[in-house]
Amino acid sequence: MFDLSSSLSYDQIFTFLCRAAGESATGDEWSAAAVNWAQSSGLTEGLNFSAKANCPRADVVYCLWKQLGASA
């Protein structure tokens, strides 16, 4: 469950973005599915991350920027 005062991890952010794009990251392997989707979508290019690590706001904005079609 998400808490308004807690940080989100990379896999949680990727899951939100994946679902917003109309894709699926559910079930027991949701974390791996979300990370795989983000990698195949090019959202992780330029990021040094671990799936369960806290995702800083700057990286959230970067992923949104990439997802919305900006060129790197």
Image: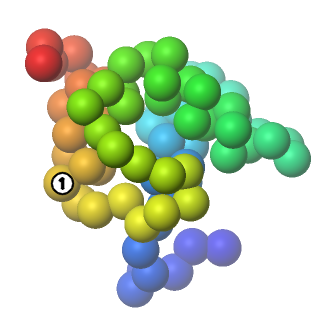
Rendering colour mode:
rainbow
Instruction: Identify the image quadrant of residue 24.
Output: top right
In the displayed structure image, the side of residue 13 where residue 28 appears, left or right:
right
| Nearer-the-camera pick, 67 or 58 | 58
| Screen quadrant of the N terminus | bottom right
- Residue drawn at (28%, 62%) of the image: 56
Give the amino acid type for the residue marked by disc 1 in the picture: Ala
Residue 45 appearing in the image: yes
* Outermost right residue: 28
- Residue drawn at (50%, 16%) of the image: 40
Image position, residue 64 (x, y; %): 27, 36
In the displayed structure image, the side of residue 32 where residue 51 appears, left or right:
left
Image position, residue 62 (x, y; %): 21, 40
Number of other residues with Cα within 10 Å of mark 1, as a class: few under 14, some 14 to 19, many 20 or more: few
* Outermost bottom residue: 5
Up the image or down, 65 lies above or below 71; here it is: below
| Nearer-the-camera pick, 50 or 20 | 50
The residue that mark 1 highlights is 58
Image position, residue 42 (x, y; %): 37, 19
Instruction: Identify the image quadrant of residue 55.
Output: bottom left
Up the image or down, 39 lies above or below 1; here it is: above
In the displayed structure image, the side of residue 31 where residue 52 appears, left or right:
left
In the displayed structure image, the side of residue 72 where residue 39 appears, left or right:
right
Residue 19 appearing in the image: no
Instruction: Identify the image quadrant of residue 30.
Output: top right
Up the image or down, 52 lies above or below 5; here it is: above
Secondary structure category for the residue under label 1: helix
Numbered marks: total: 1
- Residue drawn at (44%, 17%) of the image: 41
Image position, residue 19 (x, y; %): 56, 34
- Residue drawn at (34%, 44%) of the image: 48
